[in-house]
Image: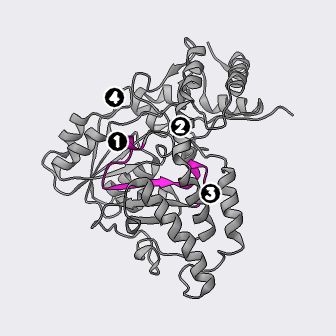
Amino acid sequence: MTPEIYLDWNATTPPHPAVLAAIEAARGVAWGNPASVHGSGRRARALVDDARAAVAALAGRDPRDVIFTGSGTEANNLALAGARLLVTSRLEHPSVTRVAEEHERSGGEVRWLPVAPDGCLSAGAVEEALRGTSGATLAVAAVNHETGVVQPLPELAEVARRSGARLHVDAVQAVGRVRAELWRHGDSLAIAAHKIRGPKGMGALIVSPGWVPRPVLRGGAQERGLRPGTQDAVAAAGFGAAVERVEESVERYAALEVERDGLERALAGVAAVNGAGAPRAPHVSSLAFAGTQSAELAAALDLEGVHVSSGSACTAGTSEPSPVIAAMHGAERALATLRVSLGEETTSSEVAGFLQALRRVLARVARP
């Protein structure tokens, strides 16, 4: 069989050996309910508390301000629940844009920010959208999930502060990929374990002291009643192990910029790079191939043993063009775009293998 080449690290990441070891060690001792006061419960609770402390240290916050969720999507939903006025853009993950759309349908106000062709938000546009508002919530992804464009969060955070707005940062695609100073801003932060080689089913919302989100779920007192439901101590142990190696991960991702740039040079004249010219995370290429259909390209590459995506994994299986690329360049280009995301274990030979497979596929499916 042809070895598989996995270039979809923005969709999810393979669990790191240290994470798997932490999970395996926890299985035998942390099966108890962390809310129970007896020995088995206390052992499980200790692992949840350790993971909470690790996430808090990562974000530069207090453990009391970390709310564990089931995903980054849930963390974004929790952060935006109860917002009166939302300010955001079509560049955001569906867990933000669909909340905003539902807010509009329910009679709430949403101010959609203009999107530039490079996919970078303007501090001036944000300031204009927030002018005259009171108690608004600004929702921005630190690193775009499709293009890798890094938003100017320090400037946006300053605009939000001056305007009295609350800034929510979706840091799901930023943590472990770029330096902390590029995402560690705002009044709340969303992260997801499986994007940093941790387990699926674990995310976190980190909030500023004194701000209490409105619960999306109703139930018991877990997570201070803000996210009721029995915590998974085993998954928490894996999340904590993943967080502990974030600094190492950032270094590994920084080294990928050479590979990513070489890939894009090899495709000069063949593909247009979405987000070119804007600051980008070092591992992502959003590539538009004129005269093709991205879903067809991705399927053909899969048959070659190469795993890439035609957009966000959360919108996979739909026939709609990527809202992100459509906002930047229109629906036609969105339907012809592939996302290639490298990761810590990606090798030069895998990048070369992808390019070879892509050329074979393009020779078959590209339309004049």
Left or right: where does residue 248 sit relative to residue 213? Answer: right
Quarter holding residue 187: bottom left
Q: Is residue 199 magenta?
A: yes
- Report the amino acid beneath label 2: Glu
Q: Looking at the image, is mark 2 or mark 4 nearer the viewer?
A: 2
- Residue 116's label in the rendered image is 4
**Upstream in sequence: badge 3 or badge 4:** 4
Callouts 3 and 1 close, C-beta under 8 Å:
no
- Which of marks 1 and 2 precedes in the sequence? 1
Q: Are marks 2 and 4 in contact (CB under 8 Å)?
A: no
Q: Please, what secondary structure does the residue beneath circle 2 have?
A: helix
Query: Mark 1 and mark 2 in contact (Cβ < 8 Å)?
Result: no
Q: How far apart are the two marked residues, 3 and 4, measured between alpha carbons?
A: 35 Å
Instruction: Give the Cα distance between marks 2 and 1.
Output: 30 Å
Q: Nearer the viewer, mark 2 or mark 1?
A: 2
Instruction: From the top left corner, tell me how far across and down residue 269 is, in percent.
Output: 55, 11
Amino acid type of the residue that numbered disc 3 sits on in the rendered structure: Pro
Which residue corresponds to the image point at 29% horizontal and 60% vertical from the top-left? 83
**Mark pair 2, 4: CA separation:** 30 Å
Q: Which residue is mark 1?
A: 89
Q: Are marks 3 and 4 in contact (CB under 8 Å)?
A: no
Which mark is on residue 251? 2
Q: Quadrant of residue 226?
A: bottom left
Q: CA distance from mark 2 to mark 3?
A: 21 Å
Q: Which mark is residue 199?
A: 3
Quarter of the image with the N terminus is top right
Q: Position of residue 19 (x, y in %)?
A: 65, 56
Of mark 2 and mark 4, the one earlier in the sequence is 4
In-image side of 295 versus 215 (left or right): right
Instruction: Please tell me which residue lies in front, 173 or 83.
Output: 173
